[in-house]
């Protein structure tokens, strides 16, 4: 059933580094509190590596096999209990000898619909994601109840090509689930808004909050941005949620009036002089 207006809820949390059991309990409580507060939510979003926290050295010990992942089991149960689609942030997925930074998508019935593996891995500023995680092969756009969502994780935000590909494929909602540092707040605010504006799409920009083990901090500035770049809802550094109703009918009308994608050239070969 296609819905012209959909209710979006994004959960901002502080992960305990390397403590998967505590993080599962925290997310369960945050989901309960906010889904009881906001009625009729269609899609819930979680941040990147919420099971482990952003600490690459902790990834191996927090890795879970898909078949018996405790985090995935909890999300499936919550999806069924509250009748909501869950875009499950990401967890560290173990597949044989390889680890992936994976986003599970779960429908209202508690079924695992698909998985997106992070394509771009961040290994700068003393971060070493690429030493532990295997790069995903492709972007993944999932359609649920007539709504098409383009999935990305954190560092993907710096690559506009992936979002343009989603928009060309028909995406309604663009999503970036992150564990973003406070030291690069300007980058986060600028890039998320730009991806919404240039693709005329609602953008769910979700990041973790809280301290990391080396004394640095997650940003904690999650937002839902509309297709014109206006912030529909945002939150500061506290744990909590952002909520917005996305009016897809108005978004489609806007796209029809401002047909930017029709002006894209087939080639942008640079002429050197």
Image (tube, rainbow, N blue to C red):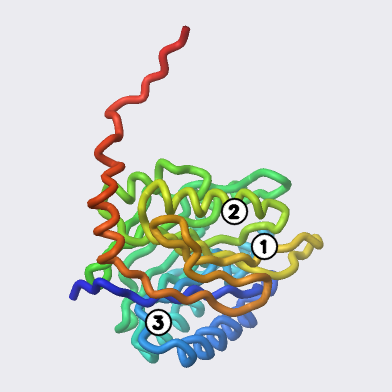
Seen at 38% across and 75% down, the residue is 245
Farthest residue toward the front? 257
Which disc number belongs to residue 92? Answer: none
Q: Is residue 213 left or right of residue 163?
A: right
Query: Residue 55, how many percent across, how many down?
Result: 68, 61
Q: Nearer the viewer, mark 3 or mark 1?
A: 1
Q: Name the residue beneath numbered marker 3.
A: 76
Quadrant housing the N terminus: bottom left
Residue count near mark 2 (Cα–Cα under 10 Å), binned few <14, some 14–19, many ≥20: many
Q: State the residue in front, 129 or 3.
A: 3
- The answer to whether residue 94 of the structure is visible from this angle is no
Q: CA distance from mark 2 to mark 3?
A: 30 Å
Query: Residue 104, how many percent across, how many down?
Result: 41, 68
Q: CA distance from mark 1 to mark 2?
A: 9 Å
Q: Quadrant of residue 207?
A: bottom right
Q: Name the residue beneath numbered marker 1.
A: 219
Q: Name the residue beneath numbered marker 2.
A: 188
Q: State the residue in front, 243 or 83.
A: 243
The numbered mark, 3 or 1, whose residue comes first in the sequence reads 3
Q: State the residue in front, 21 or 41.
A: 41
Quick check: marks 2 and 3 in contact, CB under 8 Å? Answer: no
């Amino acid at each position: 059933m296609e819905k012209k207006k959909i209710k979006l809820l994004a959960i901002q949390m502080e992960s305990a580094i390397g403590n998967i059991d505590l993080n599962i309990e925290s997310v369960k409580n945050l989901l309960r509190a906010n889904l009881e507060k906001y009625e009729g939510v269609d899609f819930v979003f979680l941040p990147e590596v919420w099971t482990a926290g952003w600490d690459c050295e902790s990834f191996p010990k927090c890795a879970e096999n898909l078949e018996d992942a405790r985090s995935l089991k909890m999300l499936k149960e919550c999806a069924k209990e509250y009748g909501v689609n869950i875009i499950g942030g990401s967890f560290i997925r173990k597949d044989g000898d390889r680890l992936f930074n994976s986003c599970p998508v779960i429908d209202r019935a508690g079924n695992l619909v698909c998985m997106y593996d992070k394509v771009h891995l961040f290994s700068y500023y003393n971060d070493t994601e690429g030493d532990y995680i295997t790069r995903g092969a492709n972007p993944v756009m999932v359609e649920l109840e007539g709504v098409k969502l383009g999935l990305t994780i954190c560092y993907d935000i710096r690559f506009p090509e992936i979002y343009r590909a989603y928009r060309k494929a028909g995406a309604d909602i663009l999503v970036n689930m992150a564990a973003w540092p406070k030291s690069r707040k300007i980058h986060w605010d600028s890039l998320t808004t730009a991806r919404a504006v240039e693709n005329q799409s609602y953008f769910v920009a979700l990041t973790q909050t809280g301290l990391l083990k080396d004394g640095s901090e997650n940003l904690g500035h999650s937002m839902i941005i509309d297709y014109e770049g206006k912030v529909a809802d945002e939150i500061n550094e506290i744990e909590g949620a952002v909520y917005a109703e996305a009016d897809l009918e108005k978004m489609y009308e806007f796209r029809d009036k401002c047909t930017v994608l029709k002006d894209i050239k087939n080639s942008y070969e640079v002429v050197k002089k």
